[in-house]
Structure formats: structure tokens, C-alpha cells
Amino acid sequence: MVIAISGTSCAGKTLLAGELMKRHGIPYFSVDHLMMGIYRSGGDCGYSPESPVRVIASVLWPIVEGMIKTNIENGSSFIYEGFQLRPDDIERMDGDYRKSVLAVYLCLGPGYIKREYASIRGNRHVMEKRSDVEPRDKMLAAADEYLEACGRSGVAPHVIDGDFRESMERILERVGGSIASARDREKKGQAPCRRP
């Protein structure tokens, strides 16, 4: 089973992936590391870390999609997480592959960003040793764009508007239930994942 965690900056993608790894024994891969590795390789990779998400995703998605397909073909469970995983790319995967991917879409709600921006900045380093947080207006615009992309793709994101920890625990429980169901379906020889 492959889990793809997509979402906006600071929405808890790495936290969710790390908790799923601890609770379910599924390793995870941060697409941020792939992005920076390619960028730092010295060639003209077609983007910089400050490029628009669509530009970065257009370079990275074909690579990540190939990795996901390889995991599925080999029957290996894996979690991919990153802002570069766009809802439209995930939802356009070939049908048989898409059925084997549990996609999780995360977004900080605009109200949450407005109320909790100082907290978001203060907690940025919790999972990674990073302190960079985009300006509030840019974060709000990214949330609006992401919610629109989810709408165009026909998927319902997990929008965090209340207490972050409580919201994350609810998401972990829901995804954990989907993992258990997927493992049962795999044992029966069925496609492991359904659309959440």
C-alpha cells in the first residue's frame, strides 16, 4: 500500500507521516529531500526552492509517480509526503495504480492561519530543523489555491480549523482505519485502497 500525503506548508504532512510510520510500521519519504537533492546537484533542474509549487511539481511528479508505481508493482508499503504532491497529479494516475494509493490531503484553514499564525511560526521546527515560514498573506493565498485544486480534482481535504493536535489525532485515526481496511483487502487479493 502506498500513502501519498499532500498539503500546504506547515499543515502537518511530516508529522502525519512520522506518526503513521511509528503506529503502522510504514516507512516514509519526504519529497522535500528529493527536491533539495536535485536542486543541489549543480545542474539546471528547472526550479529553485522559491519557485511556484506548480513549477516544482512539474519536475518532481514524474519521478515520484514512477517511484509510487514501483512500490505498487513490488508490493511494498511506503508513505510519500510533500507539498509538491498536487491533488490533480495524484487523481490523474492510471486507474489501477490510483486504486492502490491512499491519498491524504491536508490544509490549514484560512481562519486557522489568521488566528494561529504566530503559533505556526513557533512550531515550524517541531519535526524538522527549519524555521522558514512563508508570510501570512502568502500562506493564505496558498491555502486558497490548494482548496481550489482539491475542488477541481473532486477530493475533500482535511482542513485544520480548530485545535491542531486534536485535528491531527482525528486524521491519524481515520487514516489508521483506512490502513487496516487496505491491509484486509490486500489479504483478499483486492486493490488495497479506495478513495477516502
Image (cartoon, grey):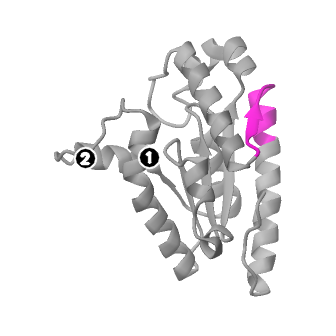
Does dot 2 land on a helix, a strand or a loop? loop
Q: Going by the image, does 12 lie left or right of 168?
A: left
Where's residue 185, x and y in %? 79, 78
Which residues lie in the magenta part? 156-169
Q: Nearer the viewer, residue 44 or 4?
A: 44
* Rendering quarter of residue 180: bottom right
Does dot 1 land on a helix, a strand or a loop? helix
For label 1, count other residues whose C-alpha is less than 10 Å away and answer few (under 14), some (14-19) or many (20+).
many
Q: Going by the image, does 191 lie left or right of 12?
A: right
Where's residue 48, x and y in %? 30, 35
Determine the CA span between mark 1 and mark 2. 12 Å
Residue assigned mark 2: 45
Q: Going by the image, does 180 lie left or right of 36?
A: right
The structure residue drawn at horizontal position 74% and vertical position 29%, both measured from the top left corner, is 164
- Name the outermost residue toward the bottom: 189
Amino acid under label 1? Answer: Ala
Q: Is residue 165 magenta?
A: yes
Quadrant location of the N terminus in the rendered image: bottom right
Residue assigned mark 1: 57
Quadrant location of the C terminus in the rendered image: bottom right
The structure residue drawn at horizontal position 59% and vertical position 60%, both measured from the top left corner, is 92
Disc with the residue nearer the chain's start (1 vs 2): 2
Where's residue 47, x and y in %? 30, 39
Amino acid under label 2? Answer: Cys
Where's residue 80, x and y in %? 54, 56
The structure residue drawn at horizontal position 45% and vertical position 23%, both measured from the top left corner, is 131
The image shows residue 10, relative to residue 93, as above or below, that is: above
Q: Nearer the viewer, residue 51 or 166?
A: 51
Q: Is residue 51 magenta?
A: no
The image shows residue 165, relative to residue 61, as above or below, that is: above
The image shows residue 42, relative to residue 114, as above or below, that is: below
The image shows residue 16, relative to residue 48, as above or below, that is: below
